Image: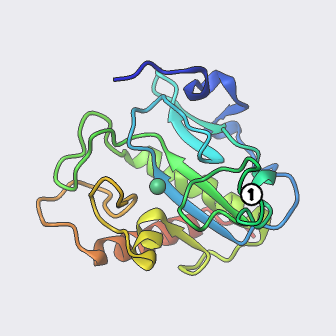
Amino acid sequence: MTERSRENEIDTYPHWRLEQWEAAAPPGRVDHLYVHWSAHDYQSVFPAYHFCIAGDGDGSIVVVNTHDVRENMRDVAEQPQRPYAAHTRGRNAYALGISIMAMREATPADFGDYPLTEPLVDALCLVTAKLAQAYGVPLDAEHVMSHAEAALHDGYFGTGPDERWDIARLAPDRRPLVPSDATRVGDELRVRMLRFRTS
Ligand SMILES: [Zn+2]
């Protein structure tokens, strides 16, 4: 494995314990939210996402703001050389990426040494729900989806090197991965997000 660099350290970025995080996000246009897992360990964070849900090593969950959300508040295809968080292929304009740090070397049947956990999934749902609320993004399948659902729409859903299946399973299962895994889990995640919505 490669050594973790500065850009993968939690301490490099603004970060909060989950209980202390607030969706105090800079104003601007956000149309879509995409949820992911990183396919790495619990602590390595990535600036390809705007918010990373990580483990800080002593068992608590931290929210790490790894990328300035304002850099995606534009049609990124117009000036692709300018920095932005490239989290979801072809869908980064006016879109934020939120990701659970987990699932290194995971397969649909075996989630490996850094599996998703219920607290991590809950944290992802809370952060996504609060961001949706802050930016007025409807919590439906058109506006808030997993990378797996986006990949399904765009023809690269799967476990191959250039394919994506995050987040099409919440638990390992020997059954082969199928497209309905993505949509069913996407629906479940949105239901869980709705529970965190406050009026
Ligand atoms: Zn992804």
Is residue 12 placed above or below 172 in the rendered structure? above
* Residue under the point 70% across and 59% down: 131
Within the image, what quadrant is residue 80 found in? Answer: bottom right
Residue, disc 1 = 72
Does residue 163 appear in the picture of this structure?
yes
The single residue placed furthest to the left in the displayed view is: 174
User: In terms of depth relative to the viewer, which is nearer, 2 or 173?
Assistant: 2
Q: Note whether ligand 1 is within 8 Å of mark 1.
A: no
Image quadrant in which the C terminus is located:
bottom right
Residue 31 is situated, as x and y percent measured from the top left of the image, at 72, 72
Q: SS at mark 1?
A: helix
Identity of the residue drawn at 21% across and 54% down: 172
Quarter of the figure with residue 7:
top right
Rendered location of residue 24, percent (x, y): 82, 49
Name the residue at the right extreme. 27
Q: Amino acid at mark 1?
A: Asn
> Looking at the image, which is closer to me, 147 or 18?
147
Query: From the image, which quarter does the N terminus lie in?
Result: top left
